[in-house]
Amino acid sequence: MQLDLSQAIQTLHSGQVLAYPTEAVWGLGCDPYNQQAFEQILQLKNRPIEKGVILIAASLKQVEPFLTGLSAAQIAQMQQSWDITEQEQASTWLVPLTHAVPTWISGHHNRVAIRVTTHPLVRQLCEGFGGAIVSTSANPAGLPPAKNSTEIVNYFGEQLAILDGPLGQSTAPSKIRDIVSGQVLRA
């Protein structure tokens, strides 16, 4: 079911799952504070809750609730990694959990993954929604992430809400790094 931006924002507010293009692959998203919608994503993907997911946002302001306890230097490092062109590989950061993160989002981890996106449509989606949303690759476990809306329909059927648009210009999914240890989990 193809939606325009305002319909997609309403879909998130009404507790439904949305498929949308990101920087390099398609994602599935929902309101991170709606456990039922989140569980629907896990069911669609056949993904165990233990793994956790990424929260994606339009700006540093939208992820501030998740940055409690980090130093100004750590926040500046993340901000610098997010101030990139659309062609560059996005950066996702693992940050220590705060009370702002629902327990189901981080899985069995003591960190939560966050990213400020460069994708114009996703920025508008997060701005319209009013905060960060769940972002996990749009694919059933073990299959490659969807690269277009046709693949979304092939994977999940016609009933899934889709905010159609072009993928971003990045050729690879985001790098994932831990802000505390500096460890790179995905290059």
Image (tube, helix red, strand yellow):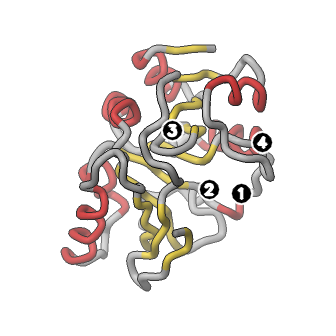
Quadrant location, the N terminus: top right
Left or right position of 119 against 187: left
Say whether disc 1 or disc 4 marks the residue closer to the N-terminus.
Answer: 4
Q: Is residue 126 above or below residue 101?
A: above
Q: Are marks 1 and 2 in contact (CB under 8 Å)?
A: yes
Alpha-carbon neighbours of circle 2 within 10 Å: few (<14), some, or many (≥20)?
some
> Which of the pair 179/66 is nearer the observer?
179
Q: Residue at x 37, y 61 (%)?
A: 66
Say whether disc 4 or disc 2 marks the residue closer to the N-terminus.
Answer: 4
Q: Residue at x 36, y 47 (%)?
A: 87
Mark 3 highlights which residue?
A: 31
Mark 1 highlights which residue?
A: 49
Q: Nearer the viewer, mark 4 or mark 2?
A: 4
Q: Amino acid at mark 1?
A: Ile
Give the numbered dot on residue 43. Answer: 4
Q: Is residue 150 above or below residue 181?
A: above
Q: Position of residue 119 (x, y in %)?
A: 37, 39
Alpha-carbon neighbours of circle 1 within 10 Å: few (<14), some, or many (≥20)?
some
Q: Position of residue 50 (x, y in %)?
A: 71, 64
Dot 1 lies on which element? Answer: helix
Q: Are marks 2 and 3 in contact (CB under 8 Å)?
A: no
Question: Disc 1 versus disc 2: distance between alpha carbons?
Answer: 7 Å
Q: Are marks 4 and 2 in contact (CB under 8 Å)?
A: no
Q: Quadrant of residue 91?
A: bottom left
Dot 4 lies on which element? Answer: helix
Question: Disc 3 versus disc 1: distance between alpha carbons?
Answer: 16 Å
Give the numbered dot on residue 104. Answer: 2
Left or right position of 51 against 172: right
Dot 2 lies on which element? Answer: loop
